[in-house]
Amino acid sequence: MQWTSGKNLGFSTAAPEKLYLPVDAASDAPNVEDQLNDPNSLLNRVKKLIQLKKHEKALQAYAEFVPVYAKENAYPFIYARACDEEMLLILLNPAVRESRAEFKLEPEISSWELLAGSQSSIQKTGNRFQVTMSGQSYSIYKLIK
């Protein structure tokens, strides 16, 4: 990613033909300066995910990984991460189209809080869940027993 939208996109003050590699010629080429100022930029989303990984025990390497919904040739892919009493639910839909899933979670979950990503439609009946996700989206929820 380039540094700025200025000359040579922040890499050098040299003439463009003197650069080792060419810079992105697009007028809307992504750059760090613009992304730092946009709370929804890829840079800021990645920074938020890194902070989440540092602070959530259920995202540490030693936490349990439990596939919740994984169908061959189908989306979404849903899994839980758990450590001690903390449990997170991660939903991934890389498909362009909306996707749905039905699954069961144990123990009984009373509520959930969105930590990162976009809000998915979640319906709960007892310990059964129905989820609808928009295309190319992800959600990370903290589950509360």
Image (cartoon, helix red, strand yellow):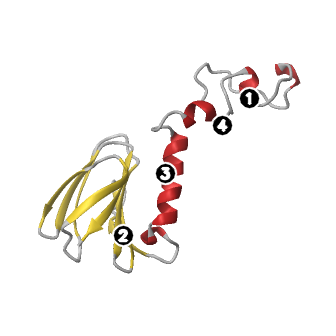
- Residue 83, percent from left and from top: 40, 77
The amino acid type found where label 4 is placed reads Met
As measured in the structure, the alpha-carbon distance from the residue carrying label 2 to the one carrying label 3 is: 24 Å
* Between marks 3 and 4 in the image, the one whose residue lies nearer the viewer: 3
**What residue does disc 2 label?**
67
Quadrant for the N terminus, please: top right
The amino acid type found where label 2 is placed reads Pro
Callout 3: helix, strand or loop?
A: helix
Quadrant for the C terminus, please: bottom left
Extreme left residue here? 125
The mark nearer the N terminus, 4 or 2, is 4
The amino acid type found where label 1 is placed reads Gly
**What residue does disc 4 label?**
1
As measured in the structure, the alpha-carbon distance from the residue carrying label 1 to the one carrying label 3 is: 25 Å
Q: Does the residue at mark 3 contact the one at mark 4 (Cβ under 8 Å)? A: no
Tell me the quarter of the picture where residue 113 sits: bottom left
- Residue 7, percent from left and from top: 74, 21
- Residue 112, percent from left and from top: 25, 61
Image-based side of 91 in relation to 7, left or right:
left
**What residue does disc 3 label?**
48
Vertical placement of residue 101 versus 13, above or below: below
**What residue does disc 1 label?**
10
The mark nearer the N terminus, 3 or 4, is 4
Vertical placement of residue 95 versus 113, above or below: above
